Image (cartoon, rainbow, N blue to C red):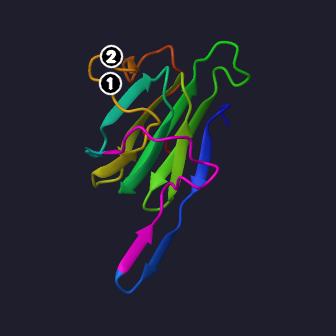
C-alpha cells in the first residue's frame, strides 16, 4: 500500500425502508479535518485522471455504482515511490479511500451504469488559487493502463 493511503470499511445499516451508511465522523481517528464535500457523476468508461494536491488530503467513496480508484506514488524519496494502488469502490465494495498530498490519483467508472463519487477533501476549493495539478490520463510516465484487465 502506498505510504499515507488508507482504507476505511463502510457499513450500510439496512432495514425494510432502505439503508443508512455513515461515511466519515469527526469523532473517529480516520477524520483529519473538513474543507468541503462534493458529489460528481461519472459516465461508464470515463477516466478522470491524473491529478494531485499539495495542500489537501482527499477522502473518496462511491455512493452509487462502481469505479476503480487508482493512486500512484510519484513522491521522490517516498518509501513507496513508483507504487500503484487500485481499489474497486462502490455498491459491491463499500470503502472510503484516503489519498494523501502529492499522490497522483484518478478514477474510472466500471460497469454499465454511471457512478456517483463523493469527495471530502480536508481543504475547500480555492477558485483563485486551485490546489490541483494535472497530467493526462494516459501519460506514459505513470505505469498504469486504464483498460479492462481480463483474467
- Front residue of 127 and 43: 127
Residue drawn at (51%, 19%) of the image = 142
Question: Which quarter of the figure has residue 15?
Answer: bottom left
Question: Dot 1: what SS?
Answer: loop
Question: Which x, y percent locates residue 140?
Answer: 47, 15
Question: Dot 2: what SS?
Answer: loop
What number is the disc on residue 129?
2
Residue drawn at (47%, 30%) of the image = 105
**CB under 8 Å between discs 2 and 1:** yes
- Front residue of 49 and 34: 34
Left/right placement of residue 81 relative to residue 133 reads right
What number is the disc on residue 126?
1
Left/right placement of residue 14 relative to residue 75 reads left
Q: Residues within 10 Å of mark 2 (few under 14, many from 20)?
A: few
Q: Is residue 85 above or below residue 78?
A: below
Residue 14: within the magenta? no
Left/right placement of residue 46 relative to residue 87 reads left
Magenta part, dominant SS: loop
Q: Residues within 10 Å of mark 1 (few under 14, many from 20)?
A: few
Question: Which quarter of the figure has residue 45?
Answer: top left
Q: How far apart are the alpha carbons under marks 2 and 1?
A: 5 Å
Instruction: Give the magenta-colored segment's residue range.
Output: 18-38
Q: Is residue 90 above or below residue 132?
A: below
Question: Which x, y percent locates residue 11?
Answer: 53, 67
Left/right placement of residue 1 relative to residue 120 reads right
Residue drawn at (70%, 13%) of the image = 77
Question: Which x, y percent locates residue 115?
Answer: 32, 51
Q: Is residue 142 above or below residue 109?
A: above
Amino acid at each position: 500500500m502506498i505510504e499515507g493511503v488508507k482504507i476505511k470499511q463502510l457499513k450500510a445499516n439496512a432495514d425494510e425502508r432502505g439503508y443508512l451508511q455513515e461515511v466519515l465522523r469527526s469523532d473517529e481517528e480516520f477524520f483529519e479535518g473538513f474543507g468541503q464535500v462534493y458529489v460528481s457523476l461519472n459516465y461508464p468508461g470515463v477516466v478522470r485522471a491524473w491529478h494531485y494536491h499539495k495542500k489537501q488530503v482527499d477522502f473518496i467513496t462511491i455512493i452509487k455504482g462502481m469505479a476503480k480508484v487508482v493512486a500512484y506514488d510519484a513522491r521522490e524519496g517516498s518509501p513507496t515511490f513508483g507504487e500503484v494502488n487500485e481499489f474497486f469502490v462502490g455498491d459491491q465494495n463499500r470503502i472510503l479511500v484516503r489519498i494523501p498530498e502529492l499522490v497522483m490519483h484518478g478514477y474510472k467508472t466500471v460497469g454499465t451504469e454511471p457512478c456517483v463519487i463523493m469527495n471530502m477533501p480536508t481543504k475547500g476549493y480555492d477558485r483563485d488559487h486551485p490546489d490541483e495539478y494535472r497530467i493526462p490520463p494516459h501519460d506514459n510516465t505513470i505505469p498504469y493502463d486504464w483498460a479492462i484487465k481480463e483474467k
